[in-house]
Image (tube, coloured by chain):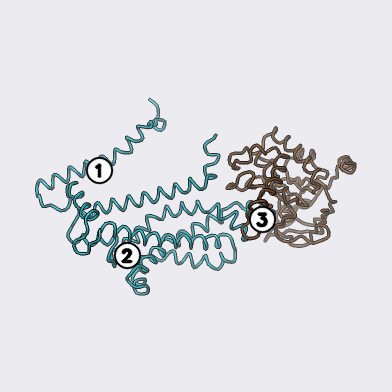
Amino acid sequence: MRRIINLRPGRGGIVLWGALPFLMAAIAYAVASSTRLAANPNDKLLPHFESFVAAIARLALNPDPRTGDYLMWVDTLASLERLGLGLAVSTALALVLGVAVGLIPYIRAGLSPIIGVISMIPPMAVLPVLFIVFGLDELSKVVLIVFGVAPFLVRDLAIKVGDMPREQLIKAQTLGASTWQIVVRVVLPQMLPRLIDAVRLSLGPAWLFLISAEAIAATEGLGYRIFLVRRYMAMDVILPYVAWITLLAFLSDAGLRWINARFFPWLQAGKGQS
Amino acid sequence: MSRLSVRNVWKEYPGQVVLERLSLEIASGEFCALVGPSGCGKTTFLRMLLGEESPTRGTIELDGKPLVAEPGPDRGVVFQRYSVFPHLTVLQNVIIGREFERSPFLGKLFGAKRRAAEEEAEEVLNEVGLSAHRAKYPAELSGGMQQRLAISQALIRKPKVLLLDEPFGALDAGTKSQMYELLLRLWAEYKMSIFMVTHDLKEGFTLATRVLAFDKVRIDPQAPGAYGATVTYNLPLEDKIAAMAVA
């Protein structure tokens, strides 16, 4: 018998083993749901799969009788807009501040202590302040995402810029590069894929902050809807919404990974051989 | 022209003297090998020539002018590793020197200017035997090819002085001897001075016209950092210098 560390699943095996936990979770849910529904047909906690389909059809395919909006799309659009804006601002901040802090000693001396302190402030603790200062509408939600995500991105990028081999920066200087040219030709092109990876990691926190802000004060949005229907214990809406959010997050992660593979071929260069 | 004068140079760090009483006159176009045991300051000396570090005391002059205290295009460099840009192809790695020179804002050339730079780069790549690999990324090249790329990258700015920090330290014996032949050919062609740090004495004597041996002459067992190293032997290899003069 070979050691278990040397046994590898084949191509089909990988699909099978990967699908197994999903399948088991679905079966467990179906069993638990039908047991509860058998005992009490009006049970709301674990609705049947058909209830999900009905709820999604009601929210996504039929206009709301009161407002005439297709609620799920309005929610999705509102949430994605806030999330996209928050992440875009954070990424831009990270590019400017991260490169400056990582590369220029005077800026590092001046800014790295305060960035270190700001990144330790729990964003949710200052959410009331954000609501008071920026109002209850869009701006405060975007600011919360920026507040929660940007310090991590800035610090991560600054560390990665600082970790660049000294030899490369010296070499660029011996080729006559100015500081600006080093930034645009040497540092930025190598840091962009690293930054995209960091943004991928911060997608989770960004959604967390978005849904928290929407739960507290909003008139539409995926997080708002979940917390609204919670009052009626409408699990048939909450669970599909959670699955939808998960799918959106998964797709944006996959999209960012695709961007890295597509636009930065040198990352993979030489890895296929040897 | 690239005459180098080093006058009574010291390099001290807190609690440690690295180099002391260093005085040298190196004529233009010499090939100097800096040899000596580890930690004896030969790389520190190279970094001072590069402008990455400045001497604590004394002066270093290139052609009678004090060295600028930061790296510049008059001094090219090849390190043992990380000398090339991993995100650029071979050709892009070579033309980037011209792009820095001719495109101050974008650092990138387009159109006819780019074609001119590419033609020039192709010539250099031909000389080092890399033209077949011009579209590859450095990670796809062998160690010897990466070092040849690093050298051609430095050559495009036609530096007066080429500084090499153990450039062949990570290469196998066969590749090394090819690199020796290449380096000597380029040195004769570009008429630059070369300073090469190596821990391989044989390499030093094979290539150089002058071997500078670094070592500590004074040692205080109670305070190992009290005295620094200096050039203990300054050996001109007369027959090679004569050959150079004839050529």
Check contact, mark 3 vs mark 2: CB within 8 A: no
Quarter of the image where one finds residue A127: bottom left
Where does label 1 land, which residue?
A25
The chain ID associated with circle 3 is B
Dots 1, 3 in contact, CB < 8 A: no
- Answer few, some or many: residues within 10 Å of disc 1's Cα (few below 14, many 20 plus, some between 14 and 19): few
- Where residue A153 appears, as percent x and y from the top left, is 46, 58
Q: Secondary structure at mark 3?
A: helix
**Chain drawn brown, letter?**
B
**Mark 2: which amino acid?**
Ala
Question: Percent x, y for residue B1?
Answer: 83, 53
Indicate left or right for A181 with A55 as reference: right
Name the chain under label 2.
A
Task: Say which residue appears at 13% left-offset and 47% top-offset.
Answer: A36
- B154 left or right, relative to B23: left
| Residue at x 37% of width, y 55% of height | A204
A237 or B228: which is nearer to us?
A237
Chain ID of residue with mark 1: A
What amino acid is labelled 1 in the image? Ala
Query: Residue at the location (49% across, 68% down)?
Result: A114
The hue of chain A in the figure is cyan
